[in-house]
Amino acid sequence: MSFSTFVTDKAGLQKLYEAIISKYETYAPVEKFGKYDYKKVSSLKECDPDSPIAMTMSVKPLFFPRSSKIMKYEANSAGTSIRETDQDPLAGQRVILGVKHCDARGLQVLEAVNKWDYIDSDFLKRRANTVILSNRCDKADTHCFCTSLDYDVENLDAPDVAIVNGTNGKIYVQARTEKGETFLKENSSEPMANRITNDELQMTNCEEDLTKQYEAFLSSFRLKMDYKDVNERMAKRFDSPAFEEASRNCVSCNTCAFICPTCHCFKISDEKIKDTGVRYKSYDSCNNVYFTLEAGGHNPRPAKYRRWRQRSMHKFVYYKERFGVNLCVGCGHCAISCPVNISIFEVVNHVASAPIES
Ligand code: SF4
Ligand code: SF4
């Protein structure tokens, strides 16, 4: 199936955003104290769908919340009974604006584990009911390395609609999935009349314009790596002392996992007051010393380097082996947010280039 492309400009795109916000439950990046996070919005003035690339929050919490009630119960001398849980506030039909391509890809990567041995119907329902409009960045930030990983940033089908800036103020709005195609057809009539066919895209200078813009984007990356080489080398270095060197400064704050679009460790905790209890599912991290602590007191990962080894091997070896994709999209959020400047890019490249212990 071939999908539609519309050519518009900043004013046309703003009109499209306004039309969407007025019609749908819409989430978009909202700035607060210099940081952006995705919030529900009721007007374009409240948000900035074209926010800077240095996002430190991913879109993940709209699909896998930071902390959510999964059950309520009553426990007393008569026994334990489950009470009805609240309606899922994230399960309705909605649109998210201003998602970065890497962040949208993160959801695609996460889907694999959410429909694996345990089917997480909450996550899948939220995904199915959401239309994602994603903006391709014009240039890379200091910690970005999305173009070095195992996905095609330019032709990605993780967003339903991709928005790419061309030259001379042109903006291309492209459907990337059937859901995106239907959505654009339903919403593009007034604000975006300039639909062009794929043939026209090739015949006009639009394709050349897109290629030129993508080449400029590619050349802006400071960080580059050969992920296949890193995958192979990491797989041979489980016992490398390089993990200890790379993780020495880590203070185990778990920030890197909480803001990562692909990390999905969680814990289950209960809060009980008198007879009534609530069970929560909340973010956790394999960097957390308590994450693997067993009831009997044994901890298979008592040392920090072992936890960092798990984190980086999971991202660049184990997940790839099981699901065929790296558990990292190269967004750089972790490096931007780490209080001691640890970068996953540096860690995996440091380990991958270390000699193999004999
Ligand atoms: S953010 Fe930095 S200090 Fe915190 S757990 Fe991650 S690597 Fe360690
Ligand atoms: S590990 Fe870091 S760079 Fe990779 S996806 Fe997570 S936050 Fe982004």
Image (cartoon, grey):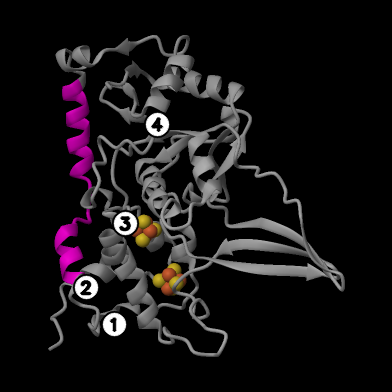
Secondary element at image label 1? helix
Q: Tell me: residue 338, above or below residue 194.
A: below
Q: Is mark 4 within 8 Å of ligand 2?
A: no
Secondary element at image label 4? loop
Q: What span is in magenta? A: 207-234
Quarter in which the N terminus is drawn: top left
Spatial separation of the CA atoms under disc 1 and disc 4:
41 Å
Q: Badge 3 is on which residue?
A: 143
**Which residue type carries mark 3?**
His
**Which residue type carries mark 4?**
Asp
Q: Badge 1 is on which residue?
A: 245
**Which residue type carries mark 2?**
His
Secondary element at image label 3? loop
Q: Residue at x 31, y 28 (%)?
A: 165
Q: Badge 4 is on which residue?
A: 160
Check residue 208 for magenta coloring: yes
Q: How many marks?
A: 4
Sequence-first tag of 4 and 2: 4
Spatial separation of the CA atoms under disc 2 and disc 3:
16 Å
- Numbered mark located on residue 350 in the image: 2
Spatial separation of the CA atoms under disc 4 and disc 2:
36 Å
> What is the x, y in percent for residue 132?
45, 34
Q: Nearer the viewer, mark 3 or mark 1?
A: 1
